[in-house]
Amino acid sequence: MNMKEPKIFFKTKINIGSYSISQTSKPMVIAEISANHNGSIELAKKTMLQAKKNGADAIKLQTYEADTITIDCDKKDFQISEGPWAGYRLYDLYKEAETPFKWHAELFKYAHEIGLICFSTPFDESAVDLLESLEAPAYKIASFEVIDIPLIKYAASKMKPIIISTGIANLDEITEAVEAVKSVNNPNLILLHCISSYPAPIEQSNIHTMVDLSNRFNLLAGLSDHTIGNTASIVATSLGAAVIEKHFIVDRTLGGPDAHFSMEPNDLSALVRDVDLANQSLGSPGYEIKDAEIGNAVFRRSIYFVKAIKKGEIITEKHIRRIRPGFGVAPKHFPEILGKKAKNDRAFGDPVRFVDFN
């Protein structure tokens, strides 16, 4: 009995704003501002403009306020005891890092003015409502929210493209998130492989997981890269990443909660360049001689006379050799030429032609 191929629900080409995302196009490079505005809307705008100048395809915000993501509580559960944010209360960290709701209209307007695609990560339903009012072209679900199925369903119900980071989630949890998007009949889903460590150790990147996500769920996949440097992003591009996301700051010396693992302008330029070159290098399967090779075809081997011969003489191994360059007949004809009579006088260094022995 012939087994039918599983029906592919999710699209393999998704548009976010003016950018068309697929596994054959250059990955969309997203610069994540996160907390790198350091409480200043002017710095947020400067960051957006710098990202545009350094080649980012899109800028991404995070849409929450401390009161929408946690509560103002001193209990142990709400204290951070280790990692880069050790010593913070959750509420205080998010109060410092938040992008206030009241900024969003101005930031989205500014992004439009400078020609930069702008969208955001909503952390609750009120954030989705705000972003809907601003006509956000897509939604990104953060790794720590991948288990918030009601939030995923609510965002996905707006029928915009949904990008979900999968850091710190197991396969069952990722499957539930995917099914949540499918349950509202939204076919516009991209999964980002992610290691939710800040910064992430490159030896734990496991980028083959990105490929498995794409194959397992039949959808587009990419990388949310928290490693230092561009190596992981370049590898992901070579494995078919549709999206590359990294945190971005105009100057790490400004400090802030996310500064230590964020890329600076020169880093972003290098990322955009390297991702583009890596994507160009992939090409498509083919065995024809490439344009860049045509001029070098003369350096291939062929058969030459290495001893002068008169018409009517028998051609022997003393007369011909397989050598470079490539203006003579191909080396594969060497055995059939031996023993033939020369049909022309030929000199030392002349290429062997078919008319010389046929």
Image: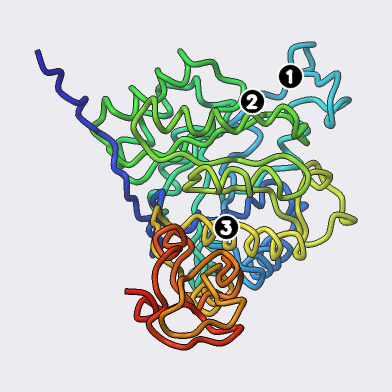
SS of the residue under disc 3: strand
Residue indicated by mark 2: 70
Report the residue that reaches farthest toward the front.
Answer: 313
Say the numbered circle drawn on residue 59: 3
Q: Earlier in the sequence, mark 2 or mark 3?
A: 3
- Residue at x 44% of width, y 44% of height: 139
Question: Does the residue at mark 1 contact the one at mark 2 (Cβ under 8 Å)?
Answer: yes
Taking the spot 24% from the left edge, 33% from the top edge, the residue there is 9
The vertical placement of 124 against 25, above or below, is: above
Q: Is residue 71 above or below residue 324?
A: above
Q: CA distance from mark 2 to mark 3?
A: 25 Å
Which of the image's four quarters has the C terminus? bottom left
**Front label number (3 vs 1):** 3
**Crowdedness near tag 2: few (<14), some (14–19) or many (≥20) residues, C-alpha within 10 Å:** some
Query: Which quarter of the image is occupied by the N terminus?
Result: top left
**Residue 355 x, y percent position in the rendering:** 35, 81
- Does 3 sit left or right of 48 as displayed? left
Q: Dot 1 lies on which element?
A: loop
Instruction: Provide residue 184's location: percent of width, then percent of height.
Output: 26, 30
Q: Secondary structure at mark 2?
A: loop
